Image (tube, grey):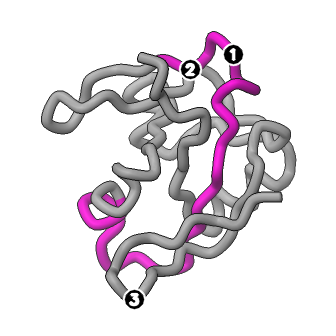
Amino acid sequence: MSDIPTTAYKVLTDEQMTALEADSFAGAPVDIADGYIHLSTQAQLTETVDRHFGGQTDLYVAAVDLAALGDSVRWEESRGGALFPHIYGRLPLEAVVAYGPLERLDDGTVRLPVTG
């Protein structure tokens, strides 16, 4: 599994982004209920937004350095048997390499936050 991405993405509401910027993020209600923070790979991000955040505004996308989180990240089967990265614990701000408002490209895909 050498082609596992090293960066994954978390979609956050304005309130959740404020919590992350203050220090760390404990999870959205669905994360807390499931016991882990849901992330998506770049390839999964647009479908995640379309399925779970349709019609919502004031959303943000955070790019997360998975290596910085060490053993708290687990790749687990989810939608359609695809592997998704999950964080078992809090998401600390220092593991976020970039973030910004959720925007779409002309083709409808979610624009990734600019890193570095």
Residues at circles 2 and 1 in contact by the CB criterion of under 8 Å? yes
Outermost left residue: 80
Q: Residues within 10 Å of mark 2 (few under 14, many from 20)?
A: some
Secondary structure, mark 3, is loop
Disc 2 secondary structure class: strand
Say which label, 3 or 2, has the lower sequence index.
2
Which label sits in the foreground, 1 or 3? 3
Q: Measure the alpha-carbon separation of dots 1 and 3.
A: 35 Å
Residue type at mark 2 is Val
Using residue 113 as the reference point, say whether residue 8 is left or right of it: left
In percent of width and height, residue 88 lies at 56, 20
Indicate whether residue 2 is drawn in magenta: no
User: Residue 106 shows which numbered tag?
Assistant: 3
Image quadrant in which you'd find residue 72: top right
Total labels: the figure holds 3
Name which residue lies at 71% across and 66% down: 114
Residue that lies at the very extreme toward the bottom in this rendered image: 106
Residue closer to the observer: 51 or 112: 112
Which mark is drawn over residue 73? 2
* Magenta stretch in the rendered image: 49-74
Residue at image location 69% in from the left, 42% down from the top:
25
**Image location (x, y in percent) of residue 95:** 77, 37
Instruction: From the top left corner, tell me how far across and down residue 31 is, in percent.
Output: 45, 36
Specify the quadrant of the image occupied by residue 58.
bottom right
Q: Taking 22 as reference, is 110 left or right?
A: left
Residue at coordinates 47% horizontally, 40% vertically from top-left?
39
Real-space Cα distance between discs 2 and 1? Answer: 6 Å
User: Percent x, y for residue 7?
Assistant: 60, 40
How many residues crowd around disc 3 within 10 Å: few (fewer than 14), some, or many (20 or more)?
A: few
Q: For residue 70, which numbered disc appears in the image?
A: 1
Q: Quadrant of the C terminus?
A: bottom right
Does 30 sit above or below residue 101?
above
